[in-house]
Image: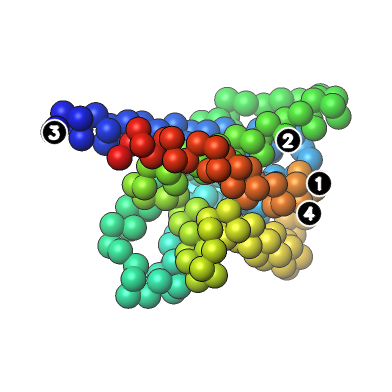
Amino acid sequence: MIHVLLTKNILRLLLYLLGVATLAFGAVLAINSRLGVSPVNLIQISISHSTNLNLGVASFIFFIICICGQLFIYKKDFKLIQFLQILFAILFGNFLNFFNEAIRLEGLSITMRIILCIISILLIGIGIFLTVTPKLVPLAPDGMAQAIAFKMKADFGKGKIVFDIIIVSTSFIFLFLSSAGFHDIGIGTILSMLLVGKVVLEINRFFKEKLEKMLF
């Protein structure tokens, strides 16, 4: 019994780490598509461009803001274990820096850029599913989406869509007030905002129950 429980916990952790890496990889593919980054990465890149901080540090700052948002929504219901999101924020930032340095795609045709954009949306949806389903500690933006869903009394996918809309709107204001420009916002941003939550909903519909039987 103990051996089975230990095996399942190790599997949960491995899936979570795979999800973090998948999210970071998807985010960097979105950057390389040059069709607009995903909403979750939009503020991080805006902070990076405006302050000359690397993408990992900008990501960490954004994650801390998301944790504060969760504290505000949950209030007394916020569990102390959720502060572990800070640790995983550092992990995500390192993955993001690694892939951002390793992947530099130049001179791509518009067809390849569209394909990259679509793959990035799918990977981000898969990454979210893999980090949320093991029920360890969500990455801070996903934790914020969960908090919004909790407040709305809706499922995670709908909370994610609302969160992405808030992020894009806030990013427009941030970029307007700064000198960073709007070149990181494009059709890919809009597609990601509209489709990532739906991708998560569909993956949940087909795979969540099966995966949970393996993990718990």
How far apart marks 2 and 3 lie (CA) works out to 43 Å
User: In the image, which disc is placed on residue 116?
Assistant: none
How far apart marks 4 and 3 lie (CA) works out to 53 Å
Q: Of the residues shown, which amino acid type is indicated by label 2?
A: Cys
**Front one among 187 and 103:** 187
| Residue 31, above or below 144 | above
Q: Secondary structure at mark 4?
A: loop
Q: Position of residue 59 (x, y in %)?
A: 52, 50
Q: Quadrant of the N terminus?
A: top left
Q: Position of residue 25 (x, y in %)?
A: 57, 33
Q: Which residue is mark 3?
A: 2
Mark 1 vs mark 4: in front: 1
How far apart marks 4 and 2 lie (CA) works out to 18 Å
User: In the image, which disc is placed on residue 117?
Assistant: 2
Q: Residues within 10 Å of mark 2 (few under 14, many from 20)?
A: many
Q: Earlier in the sequence, mark 2 or mark 1?
A: 2
User: In the image, which disc is placed on residue 187?
Assistant: 1
Q: Of the residues shown, which amino acid type is indicated by label 3?
A: Ile
Is residue 167 visible in the rendered image? The answer is no
User: In the image, which disc is placed on residue 182?
Assistant: 4
Q: Residues within 10 Å of mark 1 (few under 14, many from 20)?
A: some
- Is residue 6 left or right of 97 when viewed as pictured? left
